[in-house]
Amino acid sequence: MKRCENGHFYDPARNHACPFCTVVNVDLGATRPAALDADDPIGLDEQATVGLVQKRKGIDPVVGWLVCVAGPDRGRDHRLRVGFNYIGRSREMDVCLAGDETVSRHRHAAVVFDDRKHEFRVVPGEGRDLVYLNGEAVYGPTVLNAYDQLEVGQTRLNFVPFCGERFRWE
């Protein structure tokens, strides 16, 4: 765990910047919150839900990326993990597009990686606005291929897979 200059704790393996205030890669010396103990080094208490892949393989691996090519966060990348990766404006989202006020706060859309089928899909969210895949509206779960482009609000994201036919986390 790292602590940003504003005092927030975050996992640098999951976020390249503090997800609460977007301060990039600052470590003020604290490696974990005082509430965590040696038996629970990454904060996974018995109440927390642990992803199946994380539990089975002992890691929460990156499976791909969304790279912002247009919009307020142009040039920023977002790591994708196994399962649902929610896209929204809130800092609680896996893919936080905080600078785009046209994106719903919570769950505008999601990119899902199915570890059994080794397949990516884009899923529309719970907000009022649509998500577009290569210029077409997405109304249900739709297969996502390498270098497809998602439009969420005024943001365009290119999809770059890591896992698939050529590589799998074993």
Image (cartoon, grey):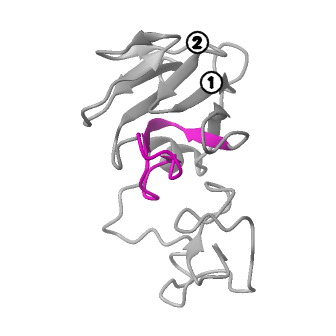
Mark 1, other Cα within 10 Å: few <14 / some 14–19 / many ≥20: many
**Residue at point 42% right, 58% down?**
92
Residue 17 position, x and y percent, is 66, 61
Residue 68 position, x and y percent, is 65, 35
Image mark for residue 3: none
* Rendered position, 159 above or below 37: above
**Residue at point 53% right, 11% down?**
134
* Rendered position, 148 above or below 40: above
Give the quarter of the figure containing the C terminus. top right
**Residue at point 60% right, 15% down?**
148
Work out whether residue 86 or residue 112 is closer to the camera in this orientation and state it: 86
Instruction: Name which residue type carries label 2.
Output: Asn
Q: What residue did someone put label 2 on?
A: 145
Q: What residue did someone put label 1 on?
A: 159
- The answer to the question of whether label 1 and label 2 lie on touching residues, with beta carbons closer than 8 A, is yes
Residue 72 position, x and y percent, is 61, 44
Mark 2, other Cα within 10 Å: few <14 / some 14–19 / many ≥20: some
Task: Find residue 49 and report its image quarter.
Answer: bottom left
Q: Is residue 78 magenta?
A: yes
Instruction: Name which residue type carries label 1.
Output: Phe
Residue 143, can we see it?
yes
The disc, 1 or 2, on the residue closer to the chain's N-terminal end is 2
Give the extent of the magenta segment.
77-102
Task: Find residue 86 and report its image quarter.
Answer: top left
